[in-house]
Amino acid sequence: MCVAIIKPNGVELPNREVLQRCFMHNSHGGGLATLDKGRRRFKITKGFFDFEVFYKHLKNNVSTEDVAFIHMRIATHGVTKNGKLYAVAEQCHPFPMTMSYYQMTKLECSVGTVFMHNGMIDIETETYDGNDVSDTMTFNRMTMKCGLDPFKKESRRMLAMASDPCRLAYMRLDKGKEEWVTVGTWEEHEDCLYSNDSYERPLAPSVVTTANKKWVNSYGYSSVGNIYMEDYDSLEGDDLYLVSKGICVYSNKPMKKDYVSDCGKYSYANVVKWLKKATVTELMLEGLSSSQAYDIVSSRKDMTPVIEKETNK
């Protein structure tokens, strides 16, 4: 689904924890658009798949006084091989507003108008250079072909109808100053705008009632029809550490088989599954101490390369 962030003029870059949480939820490539040094064009840089590299780039290139468009992607359309979808740098956001897929796929470029998007657009995607392009890229091209100007109210109304319930953002220079507009519903947090709640959404899934266990999705929510509901509070810190030791946080007693509480009402299976693969960084973002996080990681029987890399730092 991605997350798009707008940092307005006079507002500081979101803090490291917020950006890292966003990146972990949307890890298929980061990108940035902000004024270049000459302050006459926007510079787009994208294709960051390592958070530390991306964060350093943001710190070095985003000033408090300028607007910044920041994007972190989850691939839903685009390059496929043998039926599998791949996250590629060329399809990361932001994009220049253009009909040219060649221009859209540049990892660095200087442009006059910037576009980024969050959501899935119901559109038949096109191909470029032998590969499928993303829904965002196709929509960008169609917007230009139709002559829509997102800085005009009527055009934004039409863009909203065509992309609902997605969130879109556009930026251009007007008399030497950044002008930006949005389409769709955005969330404000510490003076920045976010296209969804990735900045605060827990990384760990929630505990669910055993009655709804079969409907649990990857975020620990259960669904009935199209309605999602959180069965129980998300866990953090000491509670997650208890679960890692096989203890029910509500009764403080050992869980039964298949990670069900002693009373049989709550299922921790989705939480345990996450704990078995979470990195030290992810565990600490969820409120565990460094000693607790390293204890969970070091107690695993099967260590993944990602975990090994973190524990060797």
Image: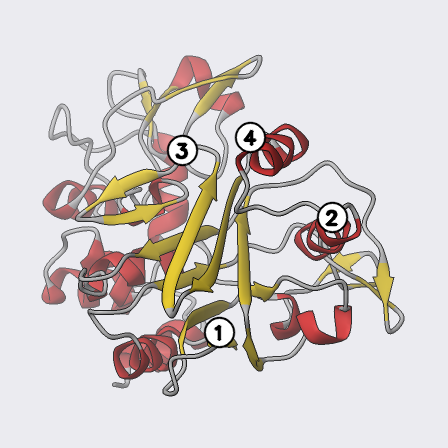
Can residue 277 be spotted in the picture? Answer: no
Q: Which residue is mark 4?
A: 165
Report how far apart the C-alphas of labels 3 and 1 lie in the structure.
Answer: 25 Å
Q: Give neighbour class at mark 2: few <14, some 14-19, many 20+ (Cα, 10 Å).
A: few
Q: Amino acid at mark 4?
A: Pro
Which label's residue is closer to the chain start, 2 or 4?
A: 2
Element under disc 3: loop
Q: Can you give x and y, in whole percent of width and height, for residue 272 in the image?
A: 35, 44
- In the image, what residue type sits under mark 2? Gly
Give residue 170's position: percent from left, percent from top: 50, 53
Kindly identify which numbered label has been placed on residue 49. 1
- Residue 262 against residue 137 in the figure, above or below: above
Disc 2 to disc 4, how far (Cα)? 22 Å
Alpha carbons under labels 4 and 1: distance apart? 27 Å
Task: Locate residue 119: give its quadrant.
Answer: top right
Amino acid type shown at disc 3? Gly
